[in-house]
Structures are given as structure tokens and as C-alpha cells.
Image: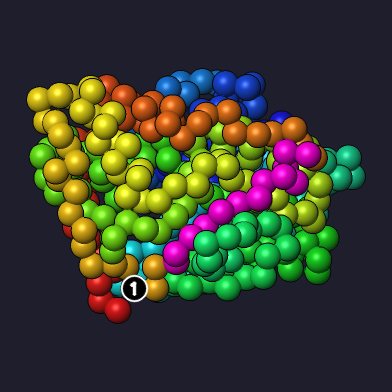
Amino acid sequence: MKLLVTGGAGFIGSAVVRRAVAEGLGVVNVDKLTYAANRDNVASVAGDASYAFEEADICDAGAIARIFAAHDPDAVMHLAAESHVDRSIDGPGAFVQTNVVGTYALLEAARAHWRGLSAPRRAAFRFHHVSTDEVFGALGPTGKFNETTPYAPNSPYSASKAASDHFARAWGETYGLPVIVTNCSNNYGPFHFPEKLIPVAILNALAGRPIPVYGRGENVRDWLYVEDHAEALLAVIRRGRVGETYAIGGSAEARNIDIVRTICRVLDARRPEGAPHERLIAFVTDRPGHDFRYAIDASKIMAELGWRPSVTLEEGLRRTVDWYLANEAWWRKLQRRGGVGERPGLSA
């Protein structure tokens, strides 16, 4: 199989690319190289004969058509997206452009390519649209999202992803494009761009700076180790049923404050000269419209495809802290990028 991955220089996309190449798949990585992308994320596979990189914007129909013609993929895994909720509050237009218009452009390019394939290849082709559990809105103290949960997005980011989900489904229903959609919980792990909670907590603690926690840190997320997610996504594109949605979660609910405290305890053991790192926790003004709780019921993908998360939250956080400690050169370069270390999302 030759797999075209959009956003393959990003956090989740690069995990997919590294794993797919390791498993012997051909991979075409299409990435615009926006602020959160980093070709260093895929440096370990860059020299592999089965890997190709194309710098392109998914909104550029001509460039995407050329890439499909040049590489002739058997499947598409669409991960390219603007993804930071705080940034979507300050600049929603970029999220509409990439996540909605870009998905439309990619669907059209994939449809044209798919229609030109031989009958056996057309039957085997897949368009896998990767999305988020944030499209479902917020949960109360009980319950979990599943594949039938109604959509109720509450941020510009989640609204743009909800729209792209609906476009993908519509292209399957209207045109017969073999579409599969997945909705995942919060990812964490190596190569995570330093703007989300876990990498910010690690890097601020290492620098002795305040660790910002929104509100009182009571918001709950279901955490999914990124390597487990990559395994799930490849299982879906290989064995998932066309027209279906699969919810992917880590079965690891935790409050934000407990995540940060765990990171601090790991750092106390790894870098005791800065201990206790919990003294750096600083409660800050909450995000506008901050969803209280997310949780995923992943029983469908477990039953149908035999996937289940393999990394516990405690172990995953230890691995993540250790990775950042061992890869200072990687994150030091990213900290020089514009906007890193600043907090967007207060303009509402």
C-alpha cells in the first residue's frame, strides 16, 4: 500500500509516518510546513526509499492534483489541520480555510484520483479523515462519547472540524468515495509542539517559569499516547469498514491539574535540583467556552479491529518527560518560533 498522509510533519501525522514506514508501507508526506510542523519530526525516515515528502497546501487544488498524479496513492489519511483551540479563538478564519476549505479541496482531488483507478484498486481505495472528540461538545461528570453522539461543537476549532467531518461523510454518501472517519481524544507524547498543556508544563517547569493551568484545573480529558493512536489509525485504514466512524480513546481520564502534578513529580525525580516543581503551578484565567469534560468509549474499534491502548497514562507521562529531557535540541529550536510561549485565546 502507498499511503498519502496530509500533515505528516505535525505531531500525530509524524507518528503515523514513522510507524507506517517502519511497517513497510510506502508513504507520501504532504505538509504545508506551518508554524507547528517540523521536518525534524520525520528525520528518522527521511532517507528511506519508501518515503517521499511534498511541501504543499491542501487548499491548492493544482498542487494536490499534481501530487496525486505523481505518486498514485492507494489510500489517503487526512491529518492536516489547524488544531489549537486558543488560536482558533483569536483567528478563526485560518481554521475555516484549512480545516473546511482544505478538506473540501482534498476530497475533490481524492475523488478525481479514485475515479481513474482500475476497478480492483478503486474497490480497495480509502479516504481516512482524522478528527477529534471536541466535535461532540462537553460532557458532564458522567457518560462517554461514542460514534452516535450528536455533534455540538463549542469552539471555532471544533466547529471547523465538525464541518470537515460532515463534508467527508457527504462525499461518501453522495459520490461513493470510500470514506472512514475517526474521532480521537487528547493526544500526548514525543514531538508534541510546545503550545499544548503537557509540553508547556514540562518546558516551563524545566525553565523555572510558572506553569499555567486554566481555571482551577478541574477540566477532564481522556489522554491517548500518540504512538497508540498511530497504531489505531493504521488499523482503521487497513481493516476499517467504509462509511463507518470509529472513536479512539486512551481510557485514561484525568483532570488537568492532576496531569500537571504528575509531570511535576516525574521531574522532581529526574531533575531534583528544581524540586518541588509543583511550586510553579499558576492558575490563570480560563479559556472562553472551555469544555468541562471529554471521554471516549472506544469499544467499537476494540471489538471490530482488535486495537486497544497499550501505554498507561502514568507510563506515557514518564516516557514523554524523558523524551523532552533527551531532546533539548529539538524543542529549543521551536521555542524561537513566533508566538511560542505566548497565550492566545483571550480576545473573546
Residue 290, above or below 262: below
Residue 11 lies in what quarter of the image?
top left
Q: Nearer the viewer, residue 119 or 93?
A: 93
295 is within the stretch colored magenta = yes
**Residue 44 in view (yes/no):** yes
> In the image, what residue occupies the spot 74% across and 68% down?
170
**Residue at horizontal 28%, vertical 64%?**
215
Measured as percent of width and height from the top left, residue 235 is found at 70, 35
What x and y, as percent, mark residue 175?
Answer: 80, 65
On screen, residue 60 versus residue 205, left or right, reads right
From the top left corner, tell me how far across and down residue 89 is, in percent: 35, 71
Q: Residues within 10 Å of mark 1 (few under 14, many from 20)?
A: some
Amino acid on which disc 1 is placed: Pro
Image position of 69 with respect to 25: above or below: below
Quadrant (top left, top right, bottom left, bottom right) of the C terminus: bottom left
Disc 1 target residue: 288
> Which region is colored magenta?
291-303
Judged left or right of residue 325, residue 167 is right
